Image (tube, rainbow, N blue to C red):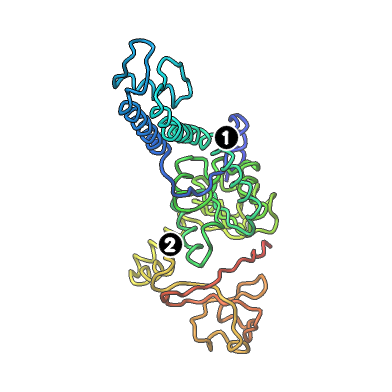
Amino acid sequence: MKHPGHDAIARQADEHLVTHRVKLPRKVVERPIRQVVKRLIMALVVLVVTALVVYADRDGYDDNADGTIDLLDAFYYATVTLSTTGYGDITPVSDGARLANIFVITPLRVLFLIILVGTTLEVLTERTREEWRLNRWRSTLRDHTVVVGFGTKGRSAIQTVCGTGLKKEQVVVVDPSSKVIDAATADGYAGVIGDATRSEVLKRAEVHKARQIIVAPQRDDTAVLVTLTARQLNRGAKIVAAVREEENAPLLKQSGADAVVTSSGAAGRLLGLSVLSPAAGMVMEDLIQQGSGLDIVERPVVRSEAGKKPRETDDLVVSVVRGHRVLGYDDPSIGTLQLTDRLITIVRVTPGAHVTPDIRPMSRE
């Protein structure tokens, strides 16, 4: 097999630097254009009210041009007054007009300025606010799950992991497509736009503090490079990777993956099983789908099960995890179950059922 990393490394050496940034899940807010239009309408309402107040008391004002105030003059005076320009060509001369300027027009002027200045300040402070959110997110993020690739495989992996109780705030998606990251943030996940084969991109996803890393890109050579980079940044995280071709699985394990799933091979075996036995294929598909019908889960041994054989438990035990070894249910070396063991069982899902997923990396011997 041709080493997939050679071509990818050569290709990346010729590429320009990729812009990468972090996007946090958006809060439910109005669109910026809608906010600006709403405030513009409010400013126009204030302008119209001011003009009507001036026009209603037009006899108390003096125009240096012709001495009379019409509706156009009223709007002109309101405009230059609210904008604090004040040319002085139209002035209040009566006591009533001056009182109206003090108690009505001046508060309207302040309100007008608040509307316009508030819009400007909000635009100017948006970046500062987002930077503060980002720094706070980085400081509190610990033991999270990083998912590289938000395609069909990555999305399904996230849904399965979150189905066991992982909060969406503990998931960070890395993908080079801004549209894909927008979709991830819309679902409530944090996202990092960039090439995950670059260490600075993974550092932005805080991969060095992650507990689990799911590698599910579109290409096998990308999966190898991502796994190598992630393992260099985090020696203790559990890394699970997906590849299309089965011949690339050993290379991924050598790169540092704890477990490798061959998508094309698994799909082919499921197709073959469905041909030979449609019922068996339906059962396997049911086991793969998280949260419906039968599920395959990993759980600790409870005290009432300690000292028993795997077949003597209430659940259907498939395998026993002892230390870093995965033993079949009929392996004679198991003997009886110990409290430190974990069981891989097949259970029927019930509403509210919740099993804490295993978080320990398997041995890479």
Q: Which residue is mark 2?
A: 269
Q: Residue at x 56, y 48 (%)?
A: 223
| Secondary element at tag 2 | helix
Q: Residue at x 65, y 41 (%)?
A: 200
Residue 60: image location, x then y, percent: 36, 23
Q: Residue at x 53, y 63 (%)?
A: 166
- The answer to whether one can see residue 225 in this image is no
Residue 16: image location, x then y, percent: 59, 29
| Quarter that holds the C terminus | bottom right
The circle on residue 341 is none
| Secondary element at tag 1 | loop
Evaluate if marks 2 and 1 touch, with contact meaning CB atoms under 8 Å apart: no
Residue 308: image location, x then y, percent: 59, 89
Mark with earlier residue (2, 1)? 1
The circle on residue 19 is 1
Viewer-closest of 8 and 98: 98
